[in-house]
Structures are given as C-alpha cells and as structure tokens.
Image: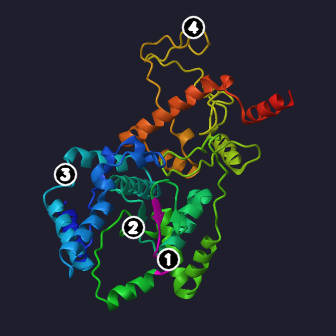
Amino acid sequence: MEERERAVAQLESVFRATNYHYHIVHLEQVLSLPSSVLEAGSSATEKPQTGSSYKAAVDQFIQTKKNQHPNFSVENAQSHLSSLSMQKVENGVTSPITPEHTQALQRLFASVRTLTAKEDLLHTLRQHLILHTARTQGYTKVMMGDSCSRLAIKLLSNISLGRGASLATDTGFSDPRYGDVVIVRPMRDYSSKEIAYYNRMFDIPSVFIPGLDTKAQDKASIQHLTESFVTKLQTDFPSTVSTIYRTSEKLHTACPRQNTNTQPFAKCLLCVCALDTKLEEFSAYQATLISEQLSQRRGPGPGFTRGTAAAPGLPPASASQGQCCSSGGGQHQGCMTGEGGCCSSAKEPETVDLKSLLCYSCRLTIKDMTAEDALPQYILSEAERRKRRSQMREEISEFLLDEEEDEAIPRVNGSL
C-alpha cells in the first residue's frame, strides 16, 4: 500500500507540471460500476451536468476572462484550471478505497489460475473503468499511449489468445466499439525506442509501476512470451516491429450494414466486440468444440456413459442426466425423467451461463477462473439482463415477422 501511495504521489507531481486537468481513479472502483458501462453508447444521454458541460464551461471561462482582461492568455487559463483540478483532488473528490473493495479485488484475481488470463482480465477491467470515467466526465475521445512496439506485440498476442476477429479495432488508430466514446492511439507511429530517446533528450520524468508480469519468466504468460520474442527478434532484425505494424494497418473489420429495421449485431459481454462464436457448419470454432468434447471423454469405467461430456458452447443434452441434485445422491423416480423435474429441496439455483454471451477469447479467460461469482456485480447483472431479454425474444419469436416476410408484404399489397 505504501508503494502504491508513493506511485500516486509521483504521478500527481508529473501531472501538475503539465498544467492539464487530470483524474486519478483506483482500480477498486471497478467493483462499483453500473451495468450500463457494458452497453455501447448507452450512457450518452445519462451524463451528469457537471461532466457533459465541462468543455463548454472551459470555453466560457476563457472567453469571459478575455473580455475582462484583454491580455489574458490561454496558458493562464490552463494554469488556473489546473489549480482548480488539483484542489478537487486534494479535497477528496475521488472516492476513497475501502478494505472490502481491495479484498474483493484480490479474491477476483486469486480465482484466476493462469497469468495469461489475469493480464487479459486486468486489461478488460481497466478499459471498463476508463470508459466509465470518460462518460461521466463528458469526454468523447480517449487517447491511449500505445506505441508501435506495443501494438506489434499486442497483434501477435491477440492472435494467440483467439482475438483475430477484433484485431482491427484492438490495434487500429481508432476504436469505435463503444459508440459514444472513441479510443484513439496517436502514438502508434512511434516505436518505444524513439519515445525513450525523446523523453531522455527533453528530460521528461517517468514513473515505473510494476505489473503482474514484472520479474516473471518469459513463458509465464502468452503476452510476456510474445513480448520477449518480438524484443529479441527486433535486436537482430530492426525491421521486425515495423513489418508487424504495417501488417496491422491492412486489417479492417467487415461490419454488416444496419438500418432502423435491422437489429444490432450481438457483442461480447466483456470486451464489447462482435461475437465470433456462432455455431456454423464446418467452422473452425465448431471443430475446436468437438475436439474439446472428445478430449474430455474417458475410457469405459464405472459410471461412464457415452455422450456425457459436453463442450462449452454446445447444448448440454445429457451431461447432467443420471444425477440427482439431492444431498443423498439417490435418484427419485421423477428426477431427470421429464415427469415434473427434480423433487429435491436441495436443488441449487440456476446460475447465469456467461459463455454464450462471450467471444472465444473471453470464454478462455472465464474458463480459467475457479469461481465466476467473483466477477464484479455489474458484469453479472448485465449477463442476467441479456439472458432475460433473449428468453423473452424466444417466447415471442413466433409472433414476430421475419425480414423477408416484412419486405414481401408491401409487394403483395401493391399487386392487389
């Protein structure tokens, strides 16, 4: 905790020297986010008045000062606004960290088995926190400091993690997946070496904050292994990073055309990218599920029945058959026979299946968790809401018109 406070103090000193407005948000605040942060563009009309009018207030303040004092410059306005922002931080505008939130966050990352999944989950939670802060403060653009070297490493690691469908948005100049807030990467044309030289020449201070992979072995995670591979290859072949980066510039996401009559395509619950897990015949994803299903099967033995294993993403047709949910382990006559369901009072409540709401890469991250209940409440609430909407749509699906039928109705009436 002392190291964290020391790092925050160093960051504050750097931010104050720039005379820019800044916000310091702790990672524990991700546990208090609303579920609307996972909806694309949903918070555009729910911004508080203080956040949405911040830029207008700044322009009005500068214009008023210019009218009162003709010699008043923009630099003076920036310094004055910076002092006001520092007073807000010192007066405790940022919500304090509670020990309960810190312990809950520690339990969340302790429930993740691999370092690869921990880094991916940490990146996702940070994106949610940055997105919520931008919306509440009234910003429509968020500039990230990703360099060319970092994006080259991210490109290869995302391919290994199964995020090939979202490479264009993850490494491109702009990331419009959130709708009302656009993520831009203006530093993507500069390598990390060029940035280090620039900071050295102009005496720009830097703050080192250790991460999850600090002092870890090269093979500790996929991200760390990819970084080590690209860095070592760049030493012998200086054009490695630029070649990978130029390849990423050629990637584009093919978005389907949408209008007011068509429904928006489904998005992942965590990364808010388009879902790439639709089961299609002869698809690579279906082959992966079948391979996993076959690997989970064991040889003939006590209690083994053919077809009991079910891969994630496939309907569990008979995975739970033959088992009663009573504590005694016995099976009643009505259990699993379609005659009224289970008769046990110890039946556990059904939990929301997150896998059907996630993309392939996020499924792997959740699969490495020992308990999905450790996820923040806003994620579980949004998953439950999407499940209810999906069930409601299935119930009224037979009363809805398809697109082909809807287009055919005017032609029939016109012919009559």
Residue appearing at x 65%, y 40% in the figure: 261
Name the N-terminal-most of marks 4 and 2. 2
Amino acid type shown at disc 2: Ala
Across and down, in percent, residue 219 comes to 48, 66
Amino acid type shown at disc 3: Pro
**Badge 1 element:** helix
Amino acid type shown at disc 1: Ser
User: Which of pointers 3 and 2 indicates the residue nearer the eye?
Assistant: 3
Disc 1/disc 4 C-alpha distance (Å)? 63 Å
- For residue 216, which numbered disc appears in the image? 2
- Please state the extent of the stretch shown in magenta in the rendering: 182-191
Disc 2/disc 1 C-alpha distance (Å)? 20 Å
Name the N-terminal-most of marks 4 and 3. 3
- Is there a contact, CB below 8 Å, between mark 3 and mark 2? no
Residue identifier under label 3 = 96
Name the N-terminal-most of marks 3 and 1. 3
Indicate whether 58 appears above or below 414. below
Residue identifier under label 1 = 149
> Does residue 372 appear in this view?
no
Q: How is the image coloured?
A: rainbow
Indicate whether 300 appears above or below 345. below
**Residue positioned most to the left:** 91
Across and down, in percent, residue 368 comes to 48, 48
> Does residue 166 appear in this view?
yes
**Badge 2 element:** loop
- Is there a contact, CB below 8 Å, between mark 1 and mark 4? no
Residue identifier under label 4 = 333
- Mark 4 burial class by Cα count in 10 Å: few <14, some 14-19, many 20+: few
Residue appearing at x 50%, y 14% in the figure: 330
- Mark 1 burial class by Cα count in 10 Å: few <14, some 14-19, many 20+: many
- Is there a contact, CB below 8 Å, between mark 3 and mark 1? no
Across and down, in percent, residue 28 comes to 28, 51
